[in-house]
Every structure is written in C-alpha cells, then in structure tokens.
Amino acid sequence: MNINKLTVATRIPIGCTKYFSSIAQTELPASFVSEDEEYKSVSRDKSGLRQQHKNVLLETTPYNEAHSWIHLTEKYQRSLYGRYGGKSNVNPQICFGTITDRSETQKRQSITQPETVQQLLEKLRVSKAEKQAAIQERENGIQKKLEKLEQWKADLNAKVEKRRADAAAAIERKERLIEEVRRHFGFKVDARDERFKEMLEQKEKEDKRKQKEAKRKVKEDKMMAKLVKQSS
Amino acid sequence: MLRHFVRSLHTQPARLSSFRSSQPVQPLEAYPEVEVVHNPPEWKYVERLLPPSTVPEPVAKPTYPSGWQPQRANGDNSSGYFVARTKNHMVPVYLHTRFRGQRRLTVVRRVQGDIWALERDLRSIVEQARNGKLCATRVNELSGQIYIHGDYVDLLREHLKSKGF
Amino acid sequence: MAHLRESSEKALKLLRTLPRVQIGNLRPNPNSKQNDKRGRAQHGGDKHGAGNKGSGQRQNFMRLGYETGNQPFYLRFPYEPYYKGHHMRRQYPPISMLQLQVLIDTDRIDASQPIDIATLCNSGLLSLKPAEMQYGFQLTDDGLDNFKAKINIEVQHASEAVIAAVERNGGVIRTAYYDPRSLHILANPKKWFAKGIPIPQRMLPPQDAAEYYTDAKNRGYLANPEEISKDRLVLAQKYGYVLPRIEDDADYEMLTAAKNARQLFHGLEPGWLINLVDKTIVKLKTT
C-alpha cells in the first residue's frame, strides 16, 4: 500500500496525520523495499486511539509529562500512584499530604472530634446516671406522697361523712319543729298559713335560744373546770 | 479556637471532590517521610478485601442448612428436559407481577430439551396444589420459558430441586 | 367440514405460489414501530400527542401533591410527628439469616474469615449506599432456625434472637458503627485503594448512636468485654442452649478477631497506604 498515494487520495489534513504513526515514518522508494519490510512498515492499528488512551489500555501512565494544570495537582498524582504503582514515578510521600496540611487537619479534628473513646464513654455514663437520678428523684417524691395518701383519704372521707351528717341533722330538726307546731295547734294546718309561719318562727327562735344556752352552759362548765383546775 | 474554625468554614473554599480543591504538588521536603514495605505480612488482610472476579463455584458440603442444593441432574435423564441453573447457582424460577400486582405470573426460565413435557409436569403439580382446578400456562419454546398463572414460585422451585435441577 | 378442507387446500395452493419467507421479505408487525419524527406541516404539526391546553400541552407536570393553588391535601391537617426528621435518620438495610446462610452455602462469602461490610459487599449480591443515609446492615431473624454456620460477623444492628442464634452455633456477633466516609470505603475497598489515599481513621459514633454501641446486650463494639461475656451466658440461659466454649475452639483466632474502634479493615492500621499494583504497604516513618 502506498501511503503517499493514500494521503493524496483522501486528503487527510496535516493536523490529523499525527494520529497515524505510519505516516510520520520516512517512506523508502518502492523498489528498495522488500516484501517483508513493507509488511512491517504498514500499521495495522486501526483503532484510531490516541497515545494516552493506548497507554491506559497497556496499563501504563497516560502521559509522560504534564499536559494540564490538573496533572500537577496532588489529587491526580495520588491517583496515578494508586492506579499504576511504582511505574508512575510518583513518590508515595505526596499521598500523605504536606506536614502543614497534616497539622491543620489534626487541629481541625481536635475541634470536630474532641473526644477519645474513654471520654465518650465517661460522658455517656454521666448523662445516663443523670437521667437515672432524675427518674429516681421523681419516684422517691411520688413514694413520699403516696405514704400520706391513706391519711388524706381518711380525712376526705371523714369530711364527707360529717357534711352528710350535718345536713341530715338540719333536716331532722326542721321536721321536728314542724311537728311541734302542728301538735300545738292540734289539727292539720296548711304550711302556708300565716299563723303556722308565725308559730314556726317563734319555735325556731326558742330552739335557737335553747341551743345558745346549751352552748353557754358548756362554755361556763369548761371555764369552771379550768378555774377549779387553776385554783387546785 | 472554635470561632476560628467556624470562620474558616465560611471563608475557605469547600473541599469538594474536584481537582480545583487540590493543591499542586509541593517539593518533597514539605511531605513527611515514608517507608515502602514490599511483601508485607499484612498483605493477606488486603487480599481478603478484593472481590472475586467471577462467581465462585460452590464447594460440595455434607449438608446445606439453607435449603439450597447444588444441581444433581446433568441433562441425560429420561424426562427429556433440563433446567439450567443461573450464573449465581440458583433455580431459575421467578415471580412477575403485572398490572400493579393484580396479575402474578410464575416464570420458569432456562428450559432446554422437551419444554412441553416440562410444562405438562409443572401444570400437573400446580393443578394438584389448586385442588384440581385448571391452570393457565404459556410456553415460549424459542427462549425456553414457561409462564404459569399465579404465584407458585416456592412450589415449583422445590419441585425442580427435588428432580435434581 | 368439506368447506374447511377446501379452504385449507386453497390456502396451501396459494402458499406454494407465494415466495418463501426470508429475511428480505419480512417486515415489522403493524403498529410495532413508533415514528420518532415529529410532524411539521400545517396538519402534521398540530399537537404532537400533547393534547389541548394546560399543563398537558405545556408538559409542565406539577409537583406531586400540588393542587393548583388549593392548600394541598398533605398540608391541610395538623401533622403527626412519627416521621419527624425521617430524612436524617440512619437506615440499616436488612439481611436475613437465611440470606446469610445461602451466601455461606454457595461460597459467596467465606465463613472461615471474619465477616464485615466489605465481605458482604464483595459477595456481589449486596450493596450499600452510604449517600442515601444507609449506615450498614442489620441482621434480621428470618430463617434463624436454619442458621447453622459458625461465624464471626460484624453488623450495624441485630436483635436479641439473632444474637442468640449466632452464639448458639459457637459464633461471635458484634455491632459496630461506621461513619459515612468509612462506609463508602468499605462498600468497595478495591476502587478506593486506587485513589492513593492513606486509610483514614474511623470516627466515633454520634451521641445518640453511642448508647446502642456501648451496650453489652447489643454486643456493641464499645461495650466492656467482661460484660459481654457475662451477657453471653445470660442469653444462653434465657434461650435455653449450651454456650459453646470459644476458648476451646479450633478457630479461636478467627472468632476473636476484632477491629479497633478506630480501625476500618481487619489487620490494617489507619494511616497506611495500600498499593494494589506493587503489592506494597506505605507507612509513615516513625521518628
């Protein structure tokens, strides 16, 4: 195959010829080229891959020198070392970050992660104990209140009973008075009658007076007893 | 200290996963010294972390507590059909749900040989489980698949396993 | 049936005269192909299947739940806070004990080595997405009666019955916390080693997770080992099995292998750089 003819025929621009390695080679006149030589000189690589991609396929570093600012960064060079190992000619030192960076990250970590395992456990223990203490305190308070509960229940019951008894006594007294008034008149009198009401008032006054007297008497008795006690 | 840290969060660019956030390589004196250990004794731990490149062939064991069992049939049995295992050594019986779960189909795949004989066998098994009620099936002879109406995945898988497939 | 036979014979006759079915005269089924071109002219370019008026025509499909200006249904009632912060909660994708037993039976994972997230992910059948708030695996109790393997496993969450099932077989189970970055590394260690970055430290659990991982009942990795061994006995009595003695076991070394609280991989220290191509480990020189 005559390469020169090919270039003329297909009019491949000069810029593209660098992708075809065979074109770059110097061409000998056909008469000097033996069959074998011609066979060797013809490239059978029809992939159209660029050199860097061929390198990747062959598991070597894609570029021998930096083609971009990206290739100068630590991140890129680290990944080169990670992927191609010692072949990449990258010193593994750069994978660990500069000394200043390391101290900075350490400082950062001391802020974001200030605790060791022991400190964490201790903190947890304290918070747990606090929570438990709060629960215990509340339980104790409730227990103390519960101890008084029986007394409170008895008091309440007594109070209710007393109120009920008082009410019953008042009703009974009223009925008694009405009965007395009726007996006084000697016949069945309507409760709305004027006389009946008057009589009832009178009886009530009398009853009150009697009660007052009874009270006073009780008081006097008490005083007397006191006096006797003092004098004796 | 904390205030400086918070301030740095606001003023410094975010450390995103980008080449822009990575600084150019410094002279080697800036980096800590390292030692490269060849043939380290810890390499066995690293090897443990590498996934196998292919699905491993299961080693024969006396018992299989999970209910899984290796394929016993090798295709020269009298029934005239063969159901191959999947690449993960599982029985190729699947459940297809269609119409938002309204239709359930049991699919038996990877059938080789007389697919119609297998269809008859499977249908009889399913109809037995349905107390004699008929069961609709569909056979794709070309792709070696049998579609059975209803969810009989466990039943058919156990049946195929009992036949050695 | 005479007419049927006649017609079939006719059809056969016709078939003989017709050309053979071959690749040259096959065409797709009617309506099986959709035209990927859009009509342009006066009547061909009308609506292009988008319909008339509104969001259908403009293809601006409204966000889910939006009711064109009404107070949406999902905002209309006072909410109930069961799912409060659900997008922030840690998720633990489940693996059942049956699944684990199948993995062991089919040799997808090696039970003679300690099992952790990396082992499970390397089986090729399970995967973990730390970016979606997945914080590791939980071992669930499905198929726990059929679980017969003696393993040393590290998961992120396990119930009491599961712990009992593992320990009944003479195995060891541990629950451990990993921060998202560590999980990302463990989900595919081989890919991560190609980055050429030293192994980082594992972070300690956050305050709300620390309680779980310091509890001996959960076999937490931060719990007191003495308490754990005591709780193993307690659990054996509760579930009524004889606890096999690990000390007398042939695989004692494997069963007692455990990671440091700051360690990511078994046997590999944080700060080491692993190179898979050269098979070297790069360490910082200690001064």
Image: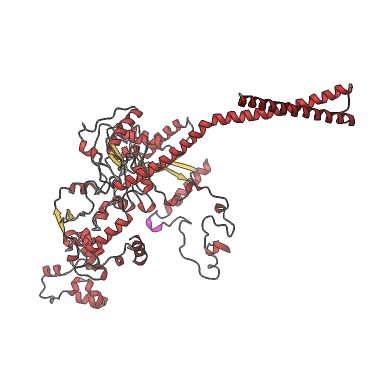
Q: Residue at x 89, y 29 (%)?
A: A195
Q: Position of residue B100 (x, y in %)?
A: 49, 46
Across and down, in percent, residue C210 comes to 35, 45
**Along the line of sight, the residue nearer the viewer: A31 or A72:** A72
Q: Left or right: B158 with respect to C172? A: right
Please tell me whether residue C127 is drawn above or below residue C59 in the rendered image: above
Q: Nearer the viewer, residue C33 or C193?
A: C193
Q: Is residue B158 above or below residue C67?
A: above
Tell me how many marks there are: 0
Residue ID at (86%, 31%): A197
A27 or B33, nearer to the observer: B33
At 39% across and 52% down in the image, what residue appears? C132
Viewer-closest of C124 and C280: C280
**Residue C25 is one of the magenta-drawn residues:** yes
Image quarter in which the C terminus of chain C is found: bottom left
Span highlighted in magenta in the image: C20-26
The picture places residue C243, in percent across and down from the top left corner, at: 28, 29
Q: Residue furthest front?
A: A231
The image shows residue A2 at horizontal and vertical percentages of 19, 74
Specify whether residue B117 is in view.
no
Q: Is residue B21 magenta?
A: no
Whether residue A104 is visible: yes
Q: Left or right: C25 with respect to C167? A: right
The answer to whether B29 is drawn above or below residue C158 in the figure is below
Query: In terms of image quadrants, where is residue A28?
Result: bottom left
Q: How is the image coloured?
A: secondary structure
**Residue A201 in which image quadrant:** top right
